[in-house]
Image: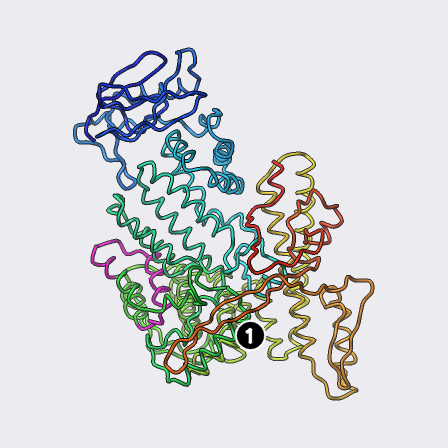
Amino acid sequence: MLPINSAVGLGQRTLFHTRVPRRTCSRIISLRPHRRSRVSYICDDKLSQCQNLPGATRSVATTTPSADALSDYDILLFRDLLTRGSAKPRIEDGGRDVVPSNTSLGAARTPAATPSIDELVEHERFPNPFQRALKALQQRDTRRLLVHLERISRLSSMELRELVAMLPRTTFTEFFRSLDPLSVASIDPTGDALITTGVYQVLSMQSIMDNWGVRKIYSQLLQRMLVLAGALKDSGQALLIDEYTCLIRCAGAASDPAGAKLLWDDLRQSPTFDWRHTEAFTEFVCARFLTRPLYTSHDRVRRMVKPRNLHRSRLLLNRHRVYTLDRLRFNDRLSKLYFGLLKDGDYAEDVMRMLRKKLPPSRLISIIQDDGYQITEPLLCALMIAFGRVGSLRFVGSRILHDYFGIQIGRFTYEAPDVHAESNIVQMPNRIRPTIRLIQAVVETYGSNGEIAVAFQLVNHISKTYQITVPLSTWHDLLEWTYIMICPPTSTAWKQAGMHTKIPSSSAVELIWNTMTSAPYHIQPGFNQYNIVIRSLLGRHQFKTTLPLMRQAVELYNAKCREYEEAVLGYVQMLRDGVYLGEMVSAYERARFVKARMNFDVQTWCRQLLSNVRSFNPTNPLSIVAVPNFIDEFRPFVLNPVRYRTATGYVSLFDPGRQCTSVKAFAAWVRMAVPMKHRRKWIYTPVKVKRFMGLSSNSLAGDVPIAKFDLVHLLTSTSRAVKRPAEKSSDESVPERFYDDDDDYY
């Protein structure tokens, strides 16, 4: 930095220096390279931007009429100036402090004194949203910080520029660190739950999920963080490498791989590009190829490798197979609305179709190896999943598992997974010792490609060789991937592509269930695992085996209902006391969603069982004894009126003591253009589908504050709607809210 003349104006006096420390507050210092003063006088204690002078840096200048008008905040900043005045300025480059060569060692070791967050909160010199955001940052309240960040993003560009000039640079770094998507996930009421289009419509989750099946808390977080980053760049400051990493994670959480690539390109043009490290590459690979479950909203069907995407990339399909696969994709899209589509596309294009080419991950791994970056297990696991997205399983087995982890796969086995089966996996000397992270990456890579048997054998081999305990989450991934590959339309797609070996046997889910619950694993399954195995058994008409599992799952549901009641009582008591606890609000929202979702799953089991009952004998005990007993036992979960089939017709039962099952209400029209291959040409077929919303008391409809409901309604219902919502056209959008409405009262 070249030395320039500067002036410090305090009252009517002016103090000159030959050099001013960087980051000195503009409310005290005004840069004047010329003899003639061009300082703008400001009234009402407001800031205005200094005129642009040739060769001068951008700054903000202020003057005060007298020394008596100095506040405690001015004295604090002036004391900070005197503390740092003897040291040379430190230049930030890529997130690290670079000390000039002419700086003494003692000055280099002395850190620059900047006002702490506690000191900044004490002074009311910032706009109200920003003052509250600083207080939430001080209290480590991520929920409130998100609320105030949304209000900060509504400020004008001039106000944001003034705030950037007033606050220390480390405060914005702390903002990025506190609003990391992995930290924000702790206040997400849905957690790691799978939200399908059926759950989205029946539970009326328009206030939680957007039209593309992404949680609004992450899509809105990306927009707010980009506004904050833009304000920093407009003020002439460069983003640090950790701040770029946080923005890339935000793009991944919003399921925006194109946005992650744009952020990476912006990083390449910034001065911090030379400070990139292995962790930055790992986060970019995760966001660019959506390798984390959070980046696809925990939807495995969305990130599954489909045979249509492998055409002309890993295999060749004839014209008839391509047409049938396109027709299957068209029919499947009608029930999925906009879920899993590109947000900026002119037609209905799946996000996974842009990840089907092998060149991008191959280029990345070549750059990492040629530039000599450290190869770590998280980076290798991210690259494994990235190559799994394009179906390059041989590359994963030979270049990653064999070269780095010493795991050699002899051949693929397509039989049903069995723990006692002879394994074709050989362990060799390794460079990196595997951990549970590798096991999760193996399940994701091979499970998404339909290689369930290979994934099971690799998990069994790694856990026994390195004495790694397989957690419940890994067993859940194996169960869900197996169930997905068995059920249509996935199994239908593999059949139409002529790849029958990708489809496991119908009893594969039950085999994995028996393995995880027996020796030597003895895993205690949760409600989500019961949900998968019960759905699989009902699809095979195993009613006798299903009923005991349903009773055990209902006991888990009753336990969650008791947790919901405790959360409601705690929330109501908090409102009566007139205090605010972010943990209490998050616990209530989480318990409310879990109860509604579990109730939906049990209702789905009952509806599926009653629809699959078939009896052609009028005296069959199944229809005259078993079904009525089942309806009486699971009365809170069956539809009202309930309807099932007998040998002579249909029976409809209505319970006057229960609330009638509400009919779905029309919400909006969903219009899209689905691409299809027809006679070697791409055509775009227009589609118009109805989107519904549920109105039952067990839904998540409504955003009325709970202070307006009585305690009985809150304990017996999860809905917060006071009246039936009006029908909306396709042009009207649901208001974007990612926080509880009671936050407005604090």
How far across and how far down the image is residue 7, in percent? 28, 19
How far across and how far down the image is residue 305, in percent? 41, 71
> What quarter of the picture does the N terminus occupy?
top left
- Please tell me how crowded label 1 is: few (under 14), some (14-19), or many (20+) other residues with Cα within 10 Å: some
Which amino acid type corresponds to the residue marked 1 in the rendered image?
Glu
How far across and how far down the image is residue 282, in percent? 34, 55
Of 72 and 418, the residue lying toward us: 72
Residue 357 showing in the rendered view? yes
Q: Is residue 177 left or right of residue 135?
A: left
How are the residues colored? rainbow
Residue 450 showing in the rendered view? no
Q: Is residue 678 left or right of residue 577?
A: left
Q: Is residue 162 above or below residue 627?
A: above
Magenta part of the chain: 366-394
Q: Quadrant of residue 16?
A: top left
Secondary structure that dominates the magenta span: helix
- Residue drawn at x 36%, y 38% is 232
Q: Quadrant of residue 10?
A: top left
Q: Is residue 243 left or right of residue 595?
A: left
> What quarter of the picture does the C terminus occupy?
top right
Q: Secondary structure at mark 1?
A: helix
Give the residue at the far right of this rendering: 656
- Residue drawn at x 77%, y 73% is 629
Of 503 and 359, the residue lying toward us: 359
Give the residue at the far left of this rendering: 102
**Was residue 325 drawn as part of the magenta stretch in this picture?**
no
Question: In this figure, which residue is indicated by the disc labeled 1?
Answer: 510
How far across and how far down the image is residue 40, in percent? 34, 22
**Was residue 374 drawn as part of the magenta stretch in this picture?**
yes
- Residue drawn at x 61%, y 56% is 594
Q: Is residue 552 above or below residue 123?
A: below
